[in-house]
Image (spheres, rainbow, N blue to C red):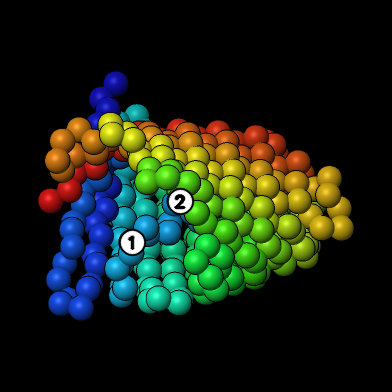
Amino acid sequence: MTRQAWLFKVQYGLFTPPENTVQFAKVLLLLGLSTPVLAISNIEERRLQKDQQGFAGRVELGLDAQAGNNEKRKWSAALNGNWQNDQYRVFSWASRLHETSNGRRTDDDTFFHTRVVRNHRRHWAQEAFVQYERDPFAALSSRALTGAGLRYQQKLDDNLLWSQGTGLFHEWVREEEASGEQSDQLTRLNLYTHLQWQLPAVKLQTTLYFQPVVDEPADQRALWQLAASIPLGSQVELKWQWQSRWDSRPPQGIEKENHQTQLRLGINF
């Protein structure tokens, strides 16, 4: 069997301080990738941890192709933007993924999230957000939501950052069932905890989400994500990520649990 496969992902970041200079650019080679069901998305990893005021952003482009007995094509594009001053922060995350196998579409994901954060006190902040996503090959025709909450963040020491959030959101969901498309509206509690350790040889991050329905607590969703970033040199970084999603009431034909692992090599220049 003749088989050629390549996977290329480009990621670069731009920061525009008052002098309007470019801060850095990054090329990311993705060594392993799987596509999860977008039941819960970890927004914490999209908060660009920068103290400078102004705009920061990151663009990601990906291509995965295979030729031979099976013809496969996958491309993805994403944009992460962040603006902040002393009192407010606004950040957004948008992504698209499209995949075909032997000329037939096998994946088609769309995701958008934007959030406004108001720093009320040193450790406390108010948040409001909107989100839209669709993943028809995971039986999700569409999901739109809007919500708000409170966030507490504190540096436990110079190397350890802890964040805790609580809030509510209302979602409008359309899912594909065996009997046809089903629509529903739900109000969920949104609880999350995020820890980040900056060690001499590695940066560790872990995030836990829990989202039960307010008037039916047995309907629950959860996400646990663990990531480790290891510098291999002054400009090279290896990142490993593992995550597990759980949905007590998934659409028909979809498993309750979904696991994903990724290994990434980042090159800064």
Residue at 24% x, 42% y is: 266
Mark 2 neighbour density, 10 Å: few (under 14) some (14–19) many (20 or more): few
Q: Nearer the viewer, residue 138 or 89?
A: 89
Work out whether residue 126 or residue 183 is closer to the camera in this orientation and state it: 126
201 lies above or below 166: above
Place residue 196 in its image quadrant.
Answer: top left
Relative to 69, is 269 on the left or the right? left
Q: Quadrant of residue 185?
A: bottom right
Mark 1: secondary structure: loop
Using the image, tell me which numbered label, if any, was put on residue 50: 1
Say what amino acid the circle numbered 1 marks.
Lys
Q: Please, which residue is most extreme toward the top here?
A: 1
Residue located at (32% from left, 43% from top):
64
Position of 13 with respect to 136 (left or right) is left
Residue 17 position within the rendered picture, expressed as x and y whole percent measured from the top left: 22, 73
Measuring from the top left, give residue 179's x and y in whole percent: 80, 51
What residue sits right under mark 2 in the picture? 155
In x, y percent, where is residue 62? 31, 50
Query: Few, some or many C-alpha atoms within 10 Å of disc 1 (few <14, some 14-19, many ≥20)?
Result: few
* Residue placed most toward the observer, 41 or 168: 168
Label located before the other in sequence (1 or 2): 1
